[in-house]
Image: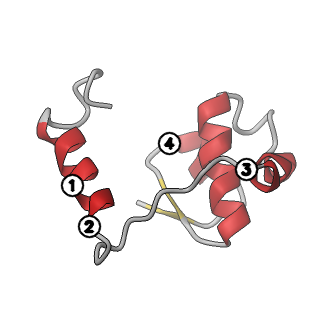
Amino acid sequence: MVEKNRLPASAYDELTQALADPEHIFTEAVISAAIVQGMRQVSRAEVPDMPDRMVAATGVYFDVPVISRDRRIRATNLKTIW
């Protein structure tokens, strides 16, 4: 997103710092086999972009809303914020 100028250049460093802080709300999620299985619940016809489907499947796996402005993700029946 930084490379596409959708986020400021400082966003990468800020995210890295947040992930390093054990008190911060953000947590890293490893793409596991269970998350890959969750991709079956994200229609390829609705969300054709593989990275977007991985993000959506992570939300499905953890049963949390997906933070996304992506219109395709938001058009699904997944819980979304933004």
**C-alpha gap between disc 1 and disc 4:** 25 Å
Residue 46 in the figure: left or right of residue 24: right
As helix, strand or loop, the secondary structure at mark 4 comes to loop
- The mark closer to the camera, 4 or 2, is 2
N-terminal of the two: label 2 or label 3?
Answer: 2
N-terminal of the two: label 4 or label 2?
Answer: 2
Q: Are marks 2 and 3 in contact (CB under 8 Å)?
A: no
Where 3 sits versus 75, above or below? Answer: above
As helix, strand or loop, the secondary structure at mark 3 comes to loop
Residue 59 in the figure: left or right of residue 6: right
Q: Are marks 1 and 2 in contact (CB under 8 Å)?
A: yes
Residue that numbered label 3 is attached to: 32
Residue that numbered label 4 is attached to: 70
Point 22% across, 37% down: residue: 7
Residue that numbered label 2 is attached to: 21
N-terminal of the two: label 4 or label 3?
Answer: 3
**C-alpha gap between disc 4 and disc 3:** 23 Å
Q: Give how far across and how far down residue 5 sits, in percent.
A: 22, 25
Point 81% across, 49% down: residue: 33
N-terminal of the two: label 1 or label 4?
Answer: 1
**C-alpha gap between disc 4 and disc 2:** 28 Å
Q: Quadrant of the C terminus?
A: bottom left
22 and 44: which is toward the camera: 22
Residue that numbered label 1 is attached to: 17
